[in-house]
Every structure is written in structure tokens, then in C-alpha cells.
Amino acid sequence: SQQGEEDPQALSIQEGENATMNCSYKTSINNLQWYRQNSGRGLVHLILIRSNEREKHSGRLRVTLDTSKKSSSLLITASRAADTASYFCATEATGGFKTIFGAGTRLFVKA
Amino acid sequence: DVKVTQSSRYLVKRTGEKVFLECVQDMDHENMFWYRQDPGLGLRLIYFSYDVKMKEKGDIPEGYSVSREKKERFSLILESASTNQTSMYLCASRSPIGGANTEAFFGQGTRLTVV
């Protein structure tokens, strides 16, 4: 069963604009992570936010977590063409071993 | 740097063949995972292993088995390949939950086509 669901499924923006992607999940979690995947490649970890954190920053990335709404958002500021990729949220359920991924958001940044 | 290596980038097999997908990691991670990725469905967990010789079914284990004889190697086996197993297969490894670093490290993926 899918734990994380991303929204939107696809997003197209101009270089320099901000991109926001959302993720919703269903059960209690230890943490939520965001990954990036370039076309046809493996996933690369971007940022992890723990269940007791509300906001986290890493360079141009800002992640928020609202455990009461079981949702998270990833903001990429001042986007670049090189940010074009698919972005996935992943959750580790409380008491579980598994990392469960959503279907992803495809981001296209036009130069 | 952590390295997770999958034995093949591209593989073409015939229906009914037994297929082995190999994954090796060099970070002494206890946890290893096999996912398949299909358009619109994201990554779906096939099997995972939390230690040598230990394995657990994921969400879609039917038609697959796994082997973990050594800590660094986790193999996915398609007992009798079928066309609906055509997909991208991704291997990942990770330290156990609760450790300082629980991010998963992925291999580059194996695109399997069953004809």
C-alpha cells in the first residue's frame, strides 16, 4: 500500500521561480524524507525531517512537516534547469522497517 | 561515499527464464531493499532484508524471491520471468531505523525487459 502521495503529479515552471511539491501520508511516522531521481537513474537522498521537527532547510530546499495533517511540502527556491527531475517523498512508519515511497512529482524547469 | 552497485543497467530475458538481479553495497548496512518502479506507481517494495539470511516480504512479493547470504549482497530472483515483470528494479541499502543516518542509498537501477 502506498504510504506517501505526492501532489501535483507534474509541475512545469520557468527558471528562477519557486517550485512547491506536497506529500500526504496515512500512518504515524518516524521521519519523512525527500528524494530526487534524474531520468532513468537511481534515487538520491535530499533531506530528512524527523517527526518532532516542523521545518528544515538545506541550501535552496525547504521542507515542512505537519504531523496533525499527515502532510509535508518541499520547496525549491530559485529553480534551475538542472533541478528538472522527479521528486519522491518517503516515510518510515513508526515501529516498521520499511521505507515507503509515493508516486512522485515530475518537475520540469524551463531555461 | 556509499556505493550501491547493481550488476546490470539493462537486461533482456525471455518469458519463463530464471533471472538473477544482484546488488552489492560497501557501507556495512544491515538493511537492504528491492523495489520496482513503474510509471505512475512510484516505487513499490518487493522484499527487504534487515540482516544476513533474514528477509521480509514487501508489498508485491509474488513471483519473486531473494537471497542474502552475505551482508553486502542482496539478490532478487525472478523464478520464472513473465512480461508483467518488465520494469525498472532499484536496490537500496540503509542503516537500521533509529541510527544517526537512516537515509537510503540507491543503486543506478536495472531496466529489465521480459520478451
Image: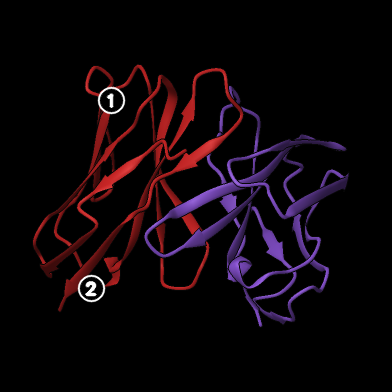
Chain colours: A red, B purple
Q: Amino acid at mark 1?
A: Lys
**The C terminus of chain A sits in image quarter:** bottom left
Neighbor class of circle 2 (other Cα within 10 Å; few <14, some 14-19, many 20+) is some
Residue hosting label 1: A70
Q: Which residue is mark 2?
A: A81
Which of discs 1 and 2 lies nearer the camera? The answer is 1
Q: Residue at x 25, y 30 (%)?
A: A71
Query: Looking at the image, do the residues carrying marks 1 and 2 touch, with CB atoms under 8 Å apart?
Result: no
Q: Is residue A71 in view from this perspective?
A: yes
Q: Amino acid at mark 2?
A: Ala
Please state if B13 lies on the left or on the right of A11 as rendered: right
- Residue B94 position by quadrant: top right
Residue at the image position 69 percent from the left and 38 percent from the top: B57
Q: Nearer the viewer, residue B112 or B32?
A: B112
The residue that appears at 84% across and 49% down in the rendered structure is B67
Q: Residues within 10 Å of mark 1 (few under 14, many from 20)?
A: some
Number of residue marks: 2
- Front residue of this view, candidates A32 and B60: B60
Residue B36, image quadrant: bottom right
Chain designation of label 1? A
